[in-house]
Amino acid sequence: MEKRKRTIFWIIPIGVIGVFFYFFGPQKAVTDNDYITYIKATPVIENSTITTGDAFTNYCEKSRWEYFQTKMMEHVVEFKGECEYENSVQPINLQYVVEKGQTEYRLGAMLVNGEQQTEEQRTAFLNLLQ
C-alpha cells in the first residue's frame, strides 16, 4: 500500500507538467494565414503602388513571414529577413499589428541585428523598399 501512494505522488505531478507543456509549450510558427496575406497585399507605404510582400521579396534575402497572437490578444504579423541597411546586409524583424477584422494595421517594432529602431529609422527603411 505504501508503494502505491509513492507512485501516485510521482504520476500526478508528471501528468500536470505534461498537460501544461502541451498547452503552453513551444508551438510551430504560423507562416501562412489570412493576416499574413492581408499585410503582404497592403501598400508598403501610404499611397504606394508596390505591395509590402513584393517590396520585401525584391529588397531582402532569406525572408519569411510569421503570425502570432500576443497575450493581449493582438494579431501580429512579423517579417524576418536579411536586408540591405546602412550599407550592409543585416537581419531585420518588422512587426505589423493587425486589427481583428483586418480592416487596418499599425506598424510595430523594428529590430535591426537585434536592436530596436526608432520610428524615424523604421520609416526611412520602409521608404527604401519602394
Image: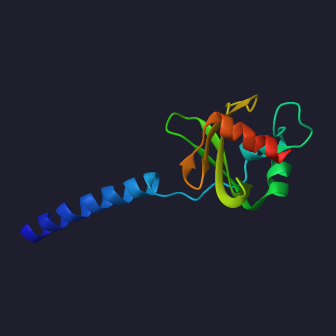
User: In which image quadrant can residue 45 be found?
Assistant: top right
Instruction: Decide if residue 4 is on the left or right side of residue 80.
Output: left
How far from the left and from the top, in percent, is residue 44? 81, 40
Which residue appears at 32% of the width and 60% of the height? 15
Eyeballing the image, is 118 above or below 93? above
Furthest toward the bottom, the residue is: 3
Left or right? Give the position of 9 relative to 62: left
Total marks shown come to 0
Residue 64 can be seen, yes or no: yes
Relative to 125, does residue 31 appear above or below in the rendering?
Answer: below
**How are the residues colored?**
rainbow
The quarter of the picture where residue 14 lies is: bottom left
Q: Nearer the viewer, residue 17 or 62?
A: 62
Q: Residue at x 59, y 35 (%)?
A: 74
> Which residue is at the front of the view, 112 or 52?
112
Where residue 66 appears, x then y in whole percent? 66, 52
Whether residue 21 sits left or right of residue 38 in the image: it is left
Q: Name the image quarter holding the C terminus.
A: top right
